[in-house]
Amino acid sequence: MKIVATNRIVEAQAKYPAVHDHLQGWFQIISSTDFENPSQLRRVFGDMRGFNSSFKFPIPDSNLLAHTSINFEACVVLVEDILPGNH
């Protein structure tokens, strides 16, 4: 999948250095896999939340959530923000 707004990942890695590797791993999995639907995404990321095109991914060892919008037909993930939140 193509990831748009990767600058938000880089900003979060700088702001929260303890989760740098977790964000990098999430990026690598998402960018190297063409998920066709939410079910396939849930098989890999069972702890994610969302439906339709809006999904939130908990970042391990933190209280951060990666807020995304995903267009499965176009294989595009927009990283909207990475913020503290409730898991």
Image (spheres, helix red, strand yellow):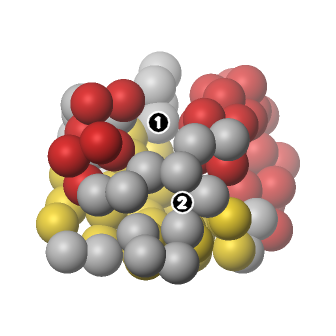
Please tell me in which quadrant of the rendered image residue 41 appears.
top left
**Can you say whether 60 is above or below 65 in the image?**
above
Q: Amino acid at mark 2?
A: Ile
Q: Say what secondary structure mark 1 lies in.
A: loop
**73 lies left or right of 53:** right
Q: Residue at x 47, y 21 (%)?
A: 61
Residue 17: x %, y % from top left: 76, 34
Residue 49: x %, y % from top left: 20, 52
**Can you say whether 70 is above or below 44 in the image?**
below
Residue 3: x %, y % from top left: 67, 65
Please tell me in which quadrant of the rendered image residue 30 appears.
top right
Q: Which residue is mark 1?
A: 59
Mark 2 Cα within 10 Å, few/some/many (few <14, many 20+)? Answer: many
Q: Say what secondary structure mark 2 lies in.
A: strand
Quadrant location, the N terminus: bottom right
Of 52 and 83, which appears nearest the observer? Answer: 52
Q: Residue at x 66, y 29 (%)?
A: 25
Q: Which residue is mark 2?
A: 82
Q: Residue at x 67, y 41 (%)?
A: 32
Q: Upstream in the sequence, badge 2 or badge 1? A: 1
> Are the residues at dot 2 and dot 1 in contact (C-beta closer than 8 Å)?
yes
**48 lies left or right of 60:** left
Q: Is residue 64 visible?
A: yes
**Can you say whether 41 is above or below 24 in the image?**
below
Q: Residue at x 68, y 65 (%)?
A: 2
Residue 51: x %, y % from top left: 17, 66
Q: Amino acid at mark 1?
A: Ile
Count of numbered tags: 2
**68 lies left or right of 27:** left
